[in-house]
Image: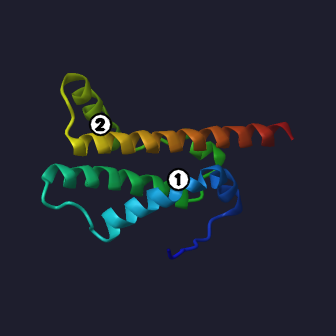
Amino acid sequence: MAQITIDIPDDLAQQLAPYQGQFSDLFTHFIATTLLGQSNRQQNSSNSTLLNTSSTYREILDFLISQPTSEQIIGFKVSETAQDRLQTLLQKNCETALTPAETAELDLYEQLDTLIGFLKIRAYTALNAALQN
């Protein structure tokens, strides 16, 4: 397996260190679906699923690449488009069965929510530590 190294600020690296094991899967999915266009083009629902989650991945990656402060991480929210799509999936899940593509999309949103939640906890902890010193 090839390895790619990117440079990020030290403070961001410290905040992301506990989650290194999850980034390989996230970046692999992002690169395959967004940059290389490797998706199941035979199914329109799969394509829209990849488009929705890829744009959300890109949104989060763009935010992280911007070297946000702890305050910015704490205040981060995904776009209204991503929030609306998640709400649609949750509503549909309550009313009917989701397609396999929609279930996968909902799972990805859950993983991204967990990641952002952990980042916010770490940022809040770092901010509190800095204020106490």
Q: Nearer the viewer, residue 72 or 120?
A: 120
Q: Nearer the viewer, residue 113 or 101?
A: 101
> Which numbered disc, 2 or 1, marks the residue that appears first in the sequence?
1
Left or right, 60 with reference to 18: left
Residue shown at 27%/67% (left/top)?
38
**Label annotation for residue 111:** none
Is disc 2 surrounded by few (<14), some (14 to 19) or many (20+) residues within 10 Å? few
Which quadrant of the figure contains the C terminus? top right
Q: Give the percent coordinates (x, y) of residue 1.
A: 50, 74
Q: Amino acid at mark 1?
A: Gln
Q: Give the percent coordinates (x, y) of residue 28.
A: 42, 63
Residue on which the image places disc 2: 84
Q: CA distance from mark 2 to mark 1?
A: 25 Å
Mark toward the viewer: 2 or 1: 1
**Which of the 4 image quadrants contains residue 108?**
top left
Residue on which the image places disc 1: 22
Residue shown at 25%/23% (left/top)?
94
Residue shown at 66%/54% (left/top)?
17
Residue 86 visible (yes or no): yes
Q: Amino acid at mark 2?
A: Asp
Q: Secondary structure at mark 1?
A: helix
| Furthest-front residue in this view | 1
| Furthest-top residue in this view | 95
Q: Secondary structure at mark 2?
A: helix
36, above or below 40, in the image: below
25, above or below 93, in the image: below
| Furthest-bottom residue in this view | 2
Left or right, 38 with reference to 75: left
Q: Nearer the viewer, residue 44 or 75?
A: 44
